[in-house]
Amino acid sequence: MVATGSAMTLSPGFLDELRARTSLSTLIGRSVPLRKAGREFKGCCPFHKETSPSFIVNDEKGFYHCFGCGAHGDAIRFLTETRGLSFMDAVRELADQAGMRIPNAEPEKHTARPQIAGESLLLGKKGGAKLNRSETVTVRLDPKLNYLCELAARAQRRTKSSFIEWAVADALRSVSLPEVVETEDFGSEREVSIQEKASQLWHVDESDRVAALALTAPALLTHEEQLIWRLIRENGYLWRGRYDKQGEWSWTIGEGNLVKERLRENWDIFKEVALGERPKEDLPGWSKSLLDDDVPF
């Protein structure tokens, strides 16, 4: 995570430990009345006016979320958003409360930037393949839009960053997925928004995100993602299926037939083969006919 407004960064391991040692419900409960609701805590959102509680706090997963305005974050973000602390000041306060010593921070080597249109959503060729809990993004706004955004944030009693995040989440309801329709009563069809498919499209693992996009809205795949998906479609090791009358292993492309665990285990290989960095022979193989002793499943 980039320490915005600071000349230093902290290791992800330190920040994860800091979050783990922080009781988020206790932290937020000091300023927001919360009540136990199953495994979570619930209360009225501190980021917008409401009378019916739609704000939840999950200690186990370390995040808060408002279903009304879309506010979402961890302990560090809660302090920066509600009290106006800088990132490092919030970290220092939480570290003091947790009895942790902040390690020597390394000089920041780069500045986060927004993703540009057409750029791949793949997060590097190797490693992790997972997004952090939150990503720092720099957004450049037209001066007029920036000022109006500031006024809108004041009207909703938010910080500007919180308002922008809410506005983006709200805008997703009006952006339709290309070539994705649903049939309604009497056979009529309607377009489907990104927000409606959010739970299907969003996954922590990069491999799951690409597969979900390919199965839901393939028109949005980048060229690189199309190359990877073609290899996935053609690889019987990744799919549940059956032997046909000719004794050949066959499968149908679909959400329920993809063995995601196998795809995650071999994700880097598929990416490198698609980019021409490894030979196709390195892809996992499978028993293609009944003549073989082993079967894919």
Image (cartoon, rainbow, N blue to C red):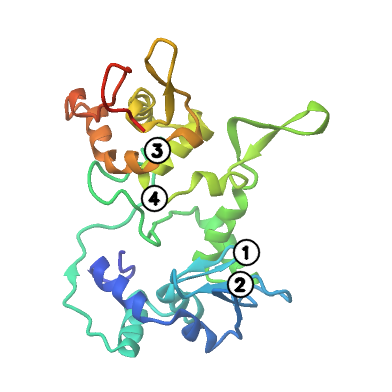
Work out whether 153 lies above or below 239: below
Contact between labelled residues 2 and 1, with CB atoms less than 8 Å apart:
yes
Of circles 3 and 1, the one toward us is 3
Position of residue 86 measured from the top left corner of the image (x, y, whole percent): 37, 77
276 sits to left or right of 238: left
Query: Which dot marks residue 259?
Result: 3
Task: Kindly identify which residue carries mark 4.
Answer: 114
Residue at (35% x, 59% y) in the render: 132
Is tag 3's residue or tag 2's residue first in the polypeptide sequence? 2
Q: CA distance from mark 3 to mark 2?
A: 35 Å
| Residue placed most toward the observer, 196 or 288 | 288
Of circles 3 and 4, the one toward us is 3
Tell me which amino acid carries mark 2: Phe
Q: CA distance from mark 3 to mark 4?
A: 33 Å
Is tag 3's residue or tag 1's residue first in the polypeptide sequence? 1
Task: Kindly identify which residue carries mark 1.
Answer: 67
